[in-house]
Image: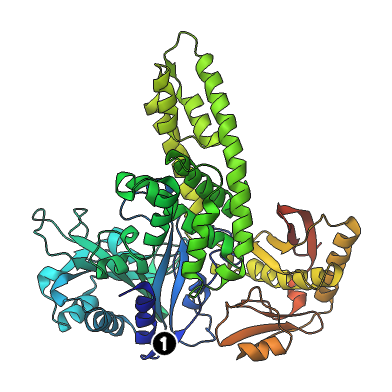
Amino acid sequence: MNAKELRNAYVDFFKKRGHAYIPSASLIPENDPTVLFTTAGMHPLVPYLMGEKHPAGKRLVNYQKCIRTGDIDDIGDSTHLTFFEMLGNWSLGDYFKEGSIKMSYDLLTEVLKIKPDNLAVTAFEGNENAPKDMETYNAWKKLGFRDDQIFFYGMEDNWWGPAGLTGPCGPDTEIFYDDGRKKCGPKCGPACKCGKYVEIWNNVFMEYNKKEDGSYVPLSQQNVDTGMGLERVLAMMNGVKSAYDTELFIPTIKEIERLSGQKYEDNVRAFRIIADHLRSATFLLGDDRGVAPSKMDQGYVLRRLIRRASRYMRKLGIEGCRMVNISKIIVEQYSDVFPELERNKEFIYSNLAAEEEKFNKTLDRGLRIADRMFEELGNSKTLDSEHAFRLYDTFGFPIELTKELADERGVSVDIKGFEERFKEHQEKSRAGAEQKFKGGLADSSDDTVKLHTATHLLNAALRQVLSADIMQKGSNITPERLRFDFNFDRKMTPEEIQKVSDIVNDAIKRNIDVVCEEIPYEEARRSGAIGVFEGKYQDIVKVYTIEGVSKEMCGGPHVSNTGDIGGFKIQKEESSAAGVRRIKAVVGKF
């Protein structure tokens, strides 16, 4: 089974069971200030899991593009990936535990042809907040699972959420592939790290609402959220040990062999880092809300991926700027599934080439700085951790390269001190890149909703003052302020900023009703409703109309009347990236 067959088999299975297919959302979360990237299929669905009505109904299925950056430094082993696809199906207040488990079992055994004896599952063991999940246990028993195939674990392993300090949460059941080898010991089970059990699916049962006082109360709407990693399952289905041994990576690896003149099996880690990072970079650049390399937020992570790939390409002896060669293979490979890559390929290639060239110059400069550092050591025979980490953090030198340079000069490096600094840096990076949703539209607070509606007014005003071609390129909302990115190639004048602000405030003063309707996508386009990108929307969409001002396709939520916003003030207008400007603004009584 290849990747396309696996995607189609999964979606078709659930469509036959009443699920509506929804397209993959952007890798850049819309209006969520607390996470840099879409990290799971459920991420774009948080408002609907919290009770908002989804236009496509109560049963949904898709394959979602995802980026997780907390383990970038672990890339190169057989399991970690930065970019991956998550197969998922959801029940929004429809079927629950038994129905979800039965469908998962049927897909695994009837469609993917996995023998029941090769499956093991987990369930929540219970604590003072929630009872032992016997409903899940009984559902698996009903399907013929033996007690030695069902394992109970605590909240660390078998509980999801809430997304923030409060909100929907609940137990889950994880499904594992058992490779049949002998257990490593009496306590060996799915939680063991020996490799006997490989997780392939997670079904989350959201049945509780965690309150501010720490108590858990039953939800009025019980949801199911599931996630299956396409790459991991594909490897398992094809009997290979790693996703890097599947069709998804083989063409890229062959191109790296051609460019370097070296063999994959002799340089496994370097090949995997290059293949993973350039696949991730290609998808980030090719997203319809794609970002360019920069010093902040998603752009910083993108730059780190590109530069790390560049280092390892040099290590393999690949000279000059060759990333585009590899990226073209990825675009060709994925464009039938994710057409935005073909649509945005020139943006991908130009940014990759520019960043690679820039880093090659930075690396050369870093080598000169390193030479000076070693010269200034004098009689000392150790390069301290501060200088070693500066070479890593400022010039992108891996500690291995610094150590090689030191060895050539008969000098040692304070590796222990470097590792301490690196660990501190890594923890900060993970906290910034992978924190859970604690605010933004996930909490639907009054302030957040006002700011969200204000972005619609701002977008309309910018199109009126600057150009009808203005489109949203990013939006980040906290309960305190909005941040709105849009395509424009110069700094706005003070007069333009004032005019935009006046248009928004005029719409607020006119107390215009905000009207929501659910209509077919094509009808919405014909009616003049604008959308953030092409190809993102499902067949039925929500359109929010502010009569005479704005008409946009959007998931919501919004205020019911513009007067509820109170007032609008632009605090700053600045550059965000090449050809992209950024406005920061607040709402309220001024």
x and y, in percent, of residue 64 in the image:
46, 71
The answer to whether residue 344 shows anywhere in this view is yes
578 or 122: which is nearer to us? 578
x 77%, y 61%: residue: 488
x and y, in percent, of residue 381 in the image:
41, 13
Is 465 placed left or right of 326 in the picture?
right
x 41%, y 87%: residue: 19
Q: Which residue lies furthest to the top in this view?
A: 379
Q: Could you say which quadrant of the image residue 412 lies in?
A: top left
123 or 292: which is nearer to us? 292
145 or 350: which is nearer to us? 350
The coloring applied to the image is: rainbow
Quadrant that contains the C terminus = bottom right
Q: Could you say which quadrant of the image residue 161 lies in?
A: bottom left
Would you place residue 214 above or below residue 261 in this image?
below
x and y, in percent, of residue 532 in the image:
66, 73
Disc 1: which residue? 19
Would you place residue 36 above or below residue 442 in this image?
above
Helix, strand or loop for disc 1: loop
Would you place residue 24 above or below residue 72 in this image?
below
Would you place residue 280 above or below residue 523 in this image?
above
> How many labels sit on residues?
1
Q: Which residue lies furthest to the right in this view?
A: 495
x and y, in percent, of residue 466 in the image:
84, 67
Three-letter amino acid code at the position of disc 1: His
The answer to whether residue 293 shows anywhere in this view is no
Is 267 placed left or right of 467 in the picture?
left
Quadrant that contains the N terminus = bottom left
Callout 1 crowding tier (Cα within 10 Å): few <14, some 14–19, many ≥20: many
